[in-house]
Image (cartoon, helix red, strand yellow):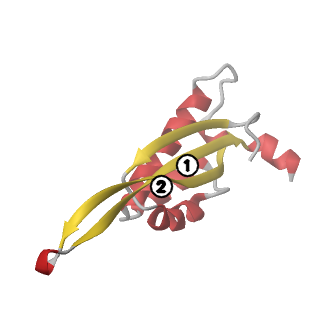
């Protein structure tokens, strides 16, 4: 992913396992923006709601810029789901024992770009 082109949004420290969110991200990668939003709104997964908020933020970054882009010109170029820190909690068990409960976190990075640039680079 090259950071110089495209408009990006990052959401950090979400208490959700990256392993559960990555399959949702794979469905919208390289899709037009309106199609990606409609897919995410129709999905029942919790990760779909988290990714949708980040995609909308990246699109608003693109639409409020100097270029005056339209929503139909945007597509989701890249979606990265990175692993964040883990919260460690004590889980008390029988006979005075204890286990560690790991609450996993993730970071979501979404990059949207305009379709005319995408058609030229393919």
Quarter of the rendering containing residue 46: bottom left
Find the residue positioned furthest to the front: 96
Q: Position of residue 102 (x, y in %)?
A: 35, 63
Q: Position of residue 70 (x, y in %)?
A: 62, 33
What residue lies at 58% left-to-right and 59% top-to-bottom? 28
Q: Where is residue 93 in the image (x, y as percent from the top left)?
A: 17, 75
**Residue 53 showing in the rendered view:** no
Side of 16 relative to 94 (left or right): right
Query: For the residue carrying disc 2, how many other residues have a C-alpha within 10 Å: few (<14), some (14-19), or many (20+)?
Result: few
Q: In this view, does 88 lie above or below 119?
A: below
Q: Position of residue 50 (x, y in %)?
A: 41, 50
Q: Name the residue under label 1.
A: 34
* Alpha carbon distance from label 2 to label 1: 6 Å
Viewer-proximal residue among 74 and 6: 6
Which secondary structure lies at badge 1? Answer: helix
**Residue 7 showing in the rendered view:** yes
What residue lies at 59% left-to-right and 64% top-to-bottom? 26
Find the residue positioned furthest to the left: 95
Q: In this view, does 116 lie above or below 84?
A: above
Q: Mark 2 points at which residue?
A: 38
What residue lies at 63% left-to-right and 58% top-to-bottom? 29
| Tags 2 and 1 touching, CB below 8 Å | yes
């Amino acid at each position: 992913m090259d950071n110089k082109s495209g408009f990006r949004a990052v959401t950090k420290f979400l208490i959700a396992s990256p392993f559960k969110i990555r399959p949702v991200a794979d469905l919208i990668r390289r899709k037009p923006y309106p199609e990606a939003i409609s897919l995410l709104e129709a999905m029942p997964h919790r990760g779909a709601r988290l990714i949708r908020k980040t995609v909308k933020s990246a699109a608003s970054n693109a639409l409020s810029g100097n270029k005056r882009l339209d929503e139909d010109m945007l597509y989701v170029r890249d979606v990265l789901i990175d692993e964040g820190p883990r919260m460690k909690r004590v889980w008390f068990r029988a006979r005075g024992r204890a286990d560690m409960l790991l609450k996993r976190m993730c970071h979501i990075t979404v990059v949207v770009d305009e379709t005319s640039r995408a058609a030229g680079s393919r």
